[in-house]
Image (cartoon, grey):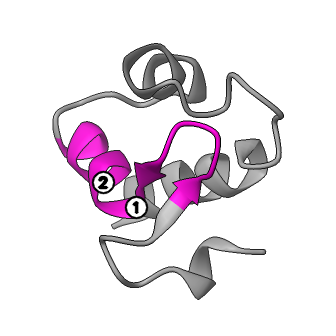
Amino acid sequence: MSEDEFTDPNEVICDCSGTTLGKIQQLIERGENSLERIGDITGAATGCGSCDAVIENILKTEKQS
């Protein structure tokens, strides 16, 4: 699974917390720029860990925009 597969802001990125792509993008726009901060705020990447790499890739992609 890669961040390129996600285009719908309603797409769930973290199944454990229900965190969507749109929520992650909002947080990045707000200045949150680490997996840890996004996890602290949403609970994403704090459960099973399967979304860690995807969120890191989203962060990287959004920073390049």
Q: Which residue is mark 1?
A: 21
Residue type (three-letter) at the residue carrying disc 2: Gln
Q: Is residue 25 magenta?
A: yes
Report crowding for label 1: few under 14, some 14 to 19, many 20 or more residues within 10 A (C-alpha): many
Specify whether residue 28 is painted magenta.
yes
* Dots 2, 1 in contact, CB < 8 A: yes
Check disc 2 and report the residue beneath it: 25
The residue that appears at 48% across and 47% down in the rendered structure is 18
Q: Residue at x 49, y 62 (%)?
A: 12
SS state under label 1: helix
Quadrant of the rendering where the N terminus is positioned: bottom right
Chain part drawn in magenta: 13-29
Question: What number is the disc on residue 2?
Answer: none
Image coordinates of residue 22 in percent, x first then y, are 28, 60
- Residue in the picture at 35% in, 82% down: 8
Q: Is residue 44 above or below residue 1?
A: above
Residue 43 in the image, given as x and y percentages of width and height: 52, 24
Residue 20, compared with residue 30, is above or below; it is: below
Task: Give the left or right position of residue 18, taking residue 1 as reference.
Answer: left
